Image (cartoon, rainbow, N blue to C red):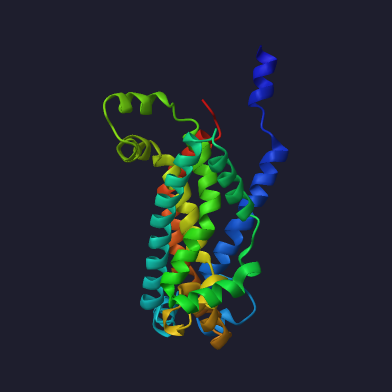
Amino acid sequence: MTSNRKRVDAPRWPLTIVLMIAALAVVIPLYVALAMAFKSTSQASDGNAFSLPWPLNPGSFATAWRLTDFPVSFGISVAVAAVTVAGTLVLSSLAAYAIARNWDRRLFRWSFFYLLGAMFLPFPVIALPQIKLTAMLGIDNPVGVALLHIVFQLSFSVLLFTAFLRSIPAALEESARIDGASAWQIFWRIIMPLLGPMNATVGIFAFLASWNDFMMPSLITADPAQQTLPVVQNIFQSQFGTSYNIAFASYLMAMAPTVLVYLFAQRWVISGVTQGAVKQ
């Protein structure tokens, strides 16, 4: 018994080393970004990215804020991401609920397989038809970008919701039906609250995909003044390529919302993934 306990408690050095290397792969680029953002223009262009910034130069953030018109592009990105998250949560949860509770019917089962097949269809393959369609409908703007984000998130989101819904006992719904509840009441009052962990999981994935997307807004949005933050940053980088400190300050400001959202929702993300993997 003692030898077995020692074997379990012994450190696993190969795994520890791998995890340390993985952590360094994240920490080192983050340190470089922070150091470059607080340097002056001359310090940032001296070729030594790992040197400590001294004296600190927080003015890079103010310059990046002004040159990129950060509040406008930031607001557009927030609006697009918010619409994407809300639309993805509502549509994918409804679709997954219908599929999970009607799995024995061929139409719903094949609809699930159809959505799975759409996961393997990348946006560049159908980019030209989407550009023409949004222009014809007059939604070649952030509204069209948000709608396309929702559509492209449905497949993966329905997959996660369906796996999670299968772990919810059907007896809960049967009891509600006996009490006279309708299908809509059962979904919104019983199922939706139980989907809390998976809502956080799907929401964070939808937010990250929408916030970090560059290709779709750059191709769909016709007005440069209505571009999202990643596109504006790319324009900024091409115009001010030598001002590395200002560029990294802009990147950090754009990265801050994703870090905050993930830190806030990470416990629900992990809970949703683990619960959705177990079928009761």
Report x, y in % for residue 234.
54, 79
Report x, y in % for residue 175.
33, 23
Report x, y in % for residue 10.
67, 28
Pick out the residue farthest to the left: 180
Pick out the residue farthest to the top: 1
Is 239 or 169 nearer to us in this picture?
169
Residue drawn at 53 percent across, 67 percent down? 213
**In the rendered image, is residue 53 in sight?**
no
Residue drawn at 49 percent across, 79 percent down? 135
Q: Quadrant of residue 256?
A: bottom left
Q: Quadrant of the N terminus?
A: top right
Report x, y in % for residue 108.
53, 42
Is 132 or 106 nearer to us in this picture?
106
Q: Quadrant of residue 16?
A: top right
**In the rendered image, is residue 163 in sight?**
yes
Pick out the residue farthest to the front: 106
Residue drawn at 60 percent across, 61 percent down? 28
Q: Is residue 202 left or right of residue 9?
A: left
Pick out the residue farthest to the right: 14
